[in-house]
Image: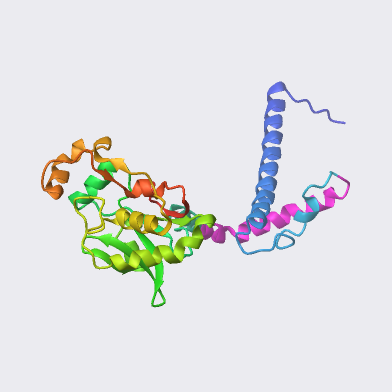
Amino acid sequence: MATFRYDENTMNKLSKAFLMVTMAIALISSSGCMSIYGRVDADLYGMRKVGGVYPFRSALKGAKPTGMWVPLVLIDLPLSLAVDTALLPLDIVKGGRSYNRSRRKPATKPNNYEPQEGDLVFQALPLDLDLVVAIEGVTESHYSHVGVLHKRDGEWTVIEASGPGVIYTPFEKWKTHGRNMRWAAFRLKAEHQKHIPQFLANLHPHAGKAYDFKYELSENKLYCSELVYHAWRKTTGQKMGKLTRIGDLNWKPHQKTIEKYNGGPIPLDRKMISPIELSKADQLQRVYNHGLDK
C-alpha cells in the first residue's frame, strides 16, 4: 500500500482551500436566504408575509433548532439561489426606484383643520411692505395679521381689517395672502363659545370702516387685532389679550416707518393690541398651525 506524506506547505494550502470553499458556501447560502427573507419581510414585490416565494419563512422564524431543519435548509439553499438569480433584474429596477423615492421631498401633511364659527385665524404677511416689516419687528413675532372666521352665504369667510379697511375675504383666498401660506387657527375655549353669535354680530357693523394706520385704540378706524379686541370687549365686557405700550416694544429699529404712518413723532405711551398678544389671550386655544411659528 502506498503511503502519502504531506509536507507542511501542502497542508497549509489544503487548509486555506478548505476554508475558502467553506466561506464561499456560507456566503452564497446566507445571501440567498437573507435576500428572500428581506423580500418577504419588506413586501417589496407585493408578496404576502406568509407563504410567497419562501414557504419555510414562517416555519423557521422564531423556531428552535430541531432535526427538521436539515431537510428544510437542504431544500432552501438551491431554491434561494435560483430565485435570487431569476429576480436579479427586478432587484436592480426596484433598487433604482427606491433610491429615487428616497430623494423626493416628503409629502405635505394634509390640511386637517375644520373651520368653526368665531375661530381667529392668524397669518404672516409678505415682507414686501414696510408696515408688515415694522409690525413683525416691533412685536418680534411672525404674527402680523388676524381675522375672524364665519360662514357667509354658505362659504367660509374671514372678516378682517386690512389695507382697504374692514372687509370680507373668502377663507381660501385669505390663506394665499400669507407669506408661504403660513397661518394658524385659534378657537374660543368651551366656556366662551356661548358668546360666539353675539361676538360675530358685533363684528359686522364695522364692515366698510377705514384701516387705522396710526394704531390708535378707537372704533372710528380699525387695525386687524383692534377689530377683534373691540368686538369681544363689547360682547363680554372683558379684554382679549394684553395691551402693550409702543415704548415697551422693539420700536427703535423701525422708528422711521412708524413715524411715516403716524405722521409725526412716535407716541411711546400709546397702548395697542398686537396680533401676537391677542393669540396669547386666556380665552383662546390653538387648534391648527401651518408653519406660523417657524
Q: Is residue 106 left or right of residue 264?
A: right
Q: Is residue 80 left or right of residue 169?
A: right
Q: Which residue is nearer to you in this view: 266 or 83?
A: 266
Q: Residue furthest front?
A: 237
Answer above or below: position of 108 versus 19: below
Residue 11 locus on image (x, y percent): 72, 26
Residue 215 locus on image (x, y percent): 23, 50
Q: Which residue is nearer to you in this view: 112 or 12?
A: 112
Residue 94 locus on image (x, y percent): 53, 59
Q: Is residue 71 left or right of residue 107?
A: right
Residue 288 locus on image (x, y percent): 46, 55
Q: Is residue 102 left or right of residue 51?
A: left
Answer above or below: position of 33 versus 114: above
Q: Residue at x 78, y 25 (%)?
A: 5
Quarter in which the N terminus is drawn: top right
Q: Residue at x 25, y 37 (%)?
A: 250
**Magenta residues, start to end:** 66-94
Q: Residue at x 71, y 38 (%)?
A: 22
Q: Which residue is nearer to you in this view: 34 or 22?
A: 34
The picture quadrant where one finds residue 125 is bottom left
Residue 120 appears anywhere in the view: yes
Answer above or below: position of 245 versus 56: above
Name the colouring of the figure.
Answer: rainbow
Q: Which residue is nearer to you in this view: 204 or 24?
A: 204
> Would residue 292 be counted in the magenta stretch?
no
Q: Residue at x 35, y 47 (%)?
A: 276
